Amino acid sequence: MQNTNKTKEQLTLELQAARKLISELWDIETDRQLAEEALKESEQFLRSTLDCLSANIALLDNQGNILHVNKAWDDFARQNGLYPNDVSIGTNYLGICDNASGTHAEEAVHFAKGIRSVASGETDFFILEYPCDSPTKKRWFAGRVTPFPGESPRKVVVAHEDITERKIAEEEMRKSEIRFRRITDSALDAY
């Protein structure tokens, strides 16, 4: 009879240990699910934040492949007669820049060199102001390349910001200064 009681005690202990293990596993699974939900929320927050920015933004890997773009990037592509898939996730942006043709192709090649310089760690950032005219108006952009913080291999963030208003103001200021100098020179010549 005592062997039966001892077996019951052992079974009771094993059952308690099994319940404890199941409870711990349940807690681990719950924690994993909560962590996954938090990660999804963080990713959605990041996407939403990037989509709110007016700059055209792309995240590139160290080979120049586009990993992520924001809404402004896709909108700019559509508005300028490009198919968003041609300049979106999975596309090699360095290849696009290297193979650019037309009036401002040398700026694109120079920009690709800047991207490579930041991606390799040779420089901390790169900025290039360049013309990017549409068929209907003159435009200027500032292309900025910065390293993406953290993991290796290095990734870079490429941001193209429309600086047309500033460039127009600078040109107007330059023209105004030239007019002022001519007036001043004419007045001095009169004496």
Image (cartoon, helix red, strand yellow):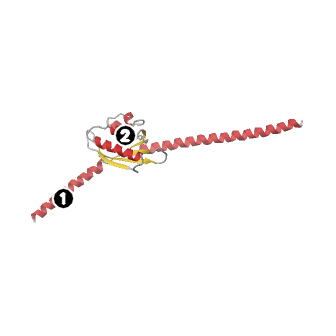
Q: Residue at x 13, y 64 (%)?
A: 188
Label drawn at residue 94: 2
- x then y, percent, for residue 6: 85, 38
- Indicate the amino acid at tag 1: Phe
- List the single residue furthest toward the bottom: 191
Q: Residue at x 76, y 40 (%)?
A: 16
- Which quadrant of the rendered structure holds the N terminus? top right
- List the single residue furthest toward the right: 1
Q: Is residue 181 above or below residue 158?
A: below
- x then y, percent, for residue 191: 10, 66
Residue 169 visible in rendering: yes
Label drawn at residue 180: 1
Look at the numbered disc 1 and give the secondary structure of its residue.
helix
Other residues around mark 2 within 10 Å, as few (<14) / some (14–19) / many (≥20): many
> Marks 2/1: CA distance?
44 Å
Q: Is residue 188 above or below residue 78?
A: below
Other residues around mark 1 within 10 Å, as few (<14) / some (14–19) / many (≥20): few
